[in-house]
Amino acid sequence: MRKLLVATTNRGKADEYRELLAGLDFDLLRLDQAGITQEAEEEHATFEENARSKAVFYADLSGLLTLADDSGLEVDALGGEPGVRSSRYAGDNATDADRVNFLLNKLMDVPLSARQARFRCAIAIAEPHGRVWLTEGECAGGIALEPKGENGFGYDPIFYVPEHGKTIAELSPSVKNSISHRGRAAALARPILEKMLKA
């Protein structure tokens, strides 16, 4: 089975990719499982640039085919924040709960009708010292008044999906993966990986 390095130490994200890429003949490894402790810089202005630089960095470092993503939340009432700073929005050592509370406090005076937001994800697949492929996915919704649901991670408990009448954290993993920004970007990445297996 061919190895695919998933450039994250986040177990929740790695588990999502295992589900999203299920059926492909790849052995998915997190960075820590591959013994990698170095951190790639994520200082670019767009999700695409961050995903690409991360995938190239870890592919060249490990010698493995590497999948990296950069994703985040864009809130219209905050001028597109937190954007590429989504994971660092409440500080470098903030927990998911800290980030959720920080964002809700920023939106305290914003009515529900003006809380439009979207999750965006860019996926880059890089060969060691070789080619790079990019895909993107988006999920539109809004920011709820309070956290609800136990599934997912990050901002999922406050991201409300109107067509389901629930936050992403209230949805089953299979429903979430079918509508999420990461699920949509991964669906486009899947045929790229399938071609590599056949090459």
Image (cartoon, rainbow, N blue to C red):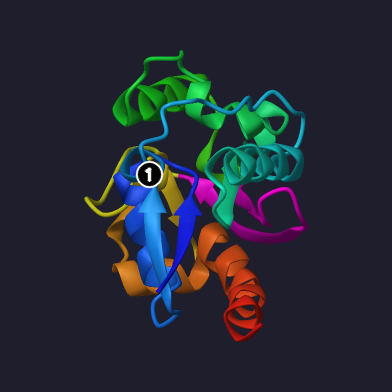
* Category of crowding for the residue at label 1, using alpha-carbon neighbours closer than 10 angstroms: few (below 14), some (14–19), many (at least 20): some
Tell me the chief SS of the magenta region: strand
Residue 40 in view here: yes
- Position of residue 81 measured from the top left corner of the image (x, y, whole percent): 64, 29
Vertically, is 152 above or below 110? below
Judged left or right of residue 99, residue 84 is: right
List the single residue furthest toward the bottom.
198
Residue 141 position by quadrant? bottom right
Q: Which residues are magenta?
A: 118-143
Query: What is the quadrant of the C terminus in the image?
Result: bottom right
For label 1, the residue is 34
- Label 1 secondary element: helix
- Position of residue 131 measured from the top left corner of the image (x, y, whole percent): 77, 58
Residue 51 position by quadrant? top right
Vertically, is 77 above or below 169? above
Tell me which residue sits at (35%, 74%) in the image. Answer: 174
Tell me which residue sits at (41%, 25%) in the image. Answer: 99
Tell me which residue sits at (64%, 59%) in the image. Answer: 138
- Check if residue 125 falls in the magenta segment: yes
Tell me which residue sits at (56%, 67%) in the image. Answer: 186
Which one is nearer the viewer's eye here, 97 or 193?
Answer: 193
- Check if residue 161 falls in the magenta segment: no
Total number of numbered labels?
1
Which one is nearer the viewer's eye here, 153 or 26?
Answer: 26
Residue 168 in view here: no
Query: What is the quadrant of the N terminus in the image?
Result: bottom left
- Position of residue 109 measured from the top left corner of the image (x, y, whole percent): 52, 23
Residue 32 position by quadrant? top left
- Position of residue 30 measured from the top left corner of the image (x, y, whole percent): 38, 47
Q: Amino acid at mark 1?
A: Ala
Judged left or right of residue 91, residue 93 is: left
